[in-house]
Image (spheres, rainbow, N blue to C red):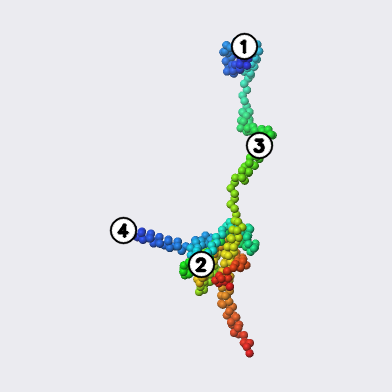
Amino acid sequence: MTCEELRRHIHEGLDDGSMGTLPELVSSHLATCCACRDFKDDLESLSHALRALPRVPLPPEALDAVWRETLHARPVGFAAPAGFWRLAAAASFVAALSTATLYFVFAPAPPPGPTAVELARASAQAEMVFGYTARALAATRDATTDRVLASRVAPAVRSATASQPSRRP
Amino acid sequence: MNPFRTTAFALLLILGVATTARAETTVATSGGYVDETMFRALVDDNQDVVEVNLDGAILQALAKNGSSEHDTPNTKDLFAKLTSIHAVIGTVKGPAEGALELVQKTDKKLRAAGWQRVTRISDATSTISVLTHTVADKVDGLVVLIFDSKDKELVFANLAGEIDVTQLGEIGERLNVPGLDQVPGSR
């Protein structure tokens, strides 16, 4: 048994109160190792001294304070080194650049707009329709004018003409 | 024979006939748009036919770019506000009376659908009808129907979208499209 293993046995024995029933190997090591014996004696003295202290109840405020601190405690953030952020920024830039390049290379082409020929044809067709429409509107205007002339102006002109003396000799 | 069954059959028959008759004479309209299919079916394909179907994308392109020497800010503005231009111009294949009847029926149906007749000029051989559709005091549709029973030439034109009729008339007269002098009623 090594000194380290023995000291672990001593810690466990003090914690669970089984120091009186230590294994044979531990007892034989203690009998031959002066340092471990001193270690055991020191720990036993400390343990007895602590147990001998008077018990003081924990004040309720202290318990509340502990709960508050526990509940409000924030997890410790990831403390990244300065170089990490530079690397992350560079990686993000490269990823964005790659995505943009792939998009421009493989994205479907936008639907082509009308060609100049199609525009010219459409313009001519539209002009023809505008022309017909304008003619129909002009016919409307002329018909309206004719009606006004016939119903209002013409009688007035007729009466004015009738009232004027003839200039014929 | 079961009288109930006979009555039900008769009612169904009447309903079916009425629906069919109505479907035959209904003019399909949506806002300022009027379906030109009826007139297209009437025109003789063996003779010269002009069919115009210009919709949003091409009209917006014309408004943005223009394409002829006639294009002015006013013309581009007119194109920008139009949503469609449809027209059928040709010679009717049946008897002139049939086409004239369709023109008159369309005129009547459009008025029943809320269109306002601006004009209807009829003489012995020709008929010109101009109708507009208005929403909130703005013209959003215009239909021109011209039929000359002598030449059997039929013109159906429909402009949909916001239309300034005065601006349209000015632009149309300035364009001086060849052959329009022969349009009935024009001087």
Are tags 2 and 4 found on a single chain?
yes
Residue indicated by mark 2? B91
Are tags 1 and 4 found on a single chain?
no
Residue indicated by mark 1? A30
Mark 1 vs mark 4, foreground winner is: 4
Is the Cβ of the residue at disc 1 closer than 8 Å to that at disc 4? no
Mark 2 vs mark 3, foreground winner is: 2
Residue indicated by mark 3? A88
Callout 2 crowding tier (Cα within 10 Å): few <14, some 14–19, many ≥20: many
Which mark identifies residue B2?
4
Where B46 sits versus A32, above or below? Answer: below
Secondary structure under tag 2 reads strand
Identify the subunit bearing mark 1. Answer: A
Q: Residue at x 67, y 36 (%)?
A: A87
Which three-letter amino acid code belongs to the residue tagged 3? Ala
The CA span between labels 4 and 3 is 87 Å
Mark 2 vs mark 4, foreground winner is: 2
Quadrant for the C terminus of chain B in the image: bottom right
Secondary structure under tag 1 reads helix
Residue A105 at least partly seen: yes
